[in-house]
Image: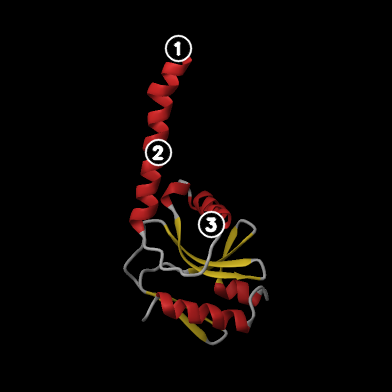
Amino acid sequence: MLKKFILKKIVPTVLVTTMLCAVLVLGTCDDTSDISLSSKLELQIRQDFAYLTGRNVCQVQVRNYYGTFNSISIVIMCYGAERMALWNETVAGIQFDTPNWTPIQAWTKGAFYTLTQAYNNNWLDLNSMQIIASRHETYFAI
């Protein structure tokens, strides 16, 4: 009886949920990153972002990954709510812009920060900011 219940109810639910996650994650944003992001780190970042924004982990993804500097991972998160407005931030005299209101964020220990906060807290130095800027230019040619 339990085996029939699992095969009829549980397995189809898991399959549908898995397929839905794949559609939500793969279908909402294109990952243009050519920098290696481990699946373990990506999952942790996605879980933290989902928790902080009240979303399901299937609804969020790392759109761009800029690398990890001094245990600070630099990312742009995607969650299907991108607005068509320009986002910008200037840090250490370097201008960062994205065309869809999705900011570059610094993630560490379960929390997200702006680049300005990460730089002002000395988590990122000028060299790190220049590397991030260079990688950013390859993602967004604006």
Question: Which residue is tagged 1?
Answer: 1
User: What's the amino acid at mark 1?
Assistant: Met
Q: Is residue 49 left or right of residue 12?
A: right
Residue farthest to the bottom?
93
Q: Work out whether mark 2 precedes mark 1 in sequence or the reverse, and give the earlier one.
A: 1
Residue 21 on image: x %, y % = 40, 45
Is there CB contact under 8 Å for labels 2 and 1? no
Looking at the rendered structure, the secondary structure element under dot 1 is: loop
Q: Work out whether mark 3 precedes mark 1 in sequence or the reverse, and give the earlier one.
A: 1
Residue 84 on image: x %, y % = 31, 68
Residue farthest to the left?
84
Quote the CA–CA distance across marks 2 and 3: 20 Å
Which residue sits at x=57%, y=75%? Answer: 116
Question: Which residue is tagged 2?
Answer: 17
Mark 2, residues whose alpha carbon is within 10 Å: few (<14), some, or many (≥20)? few
Residue 42 bears which disc, if any?
3
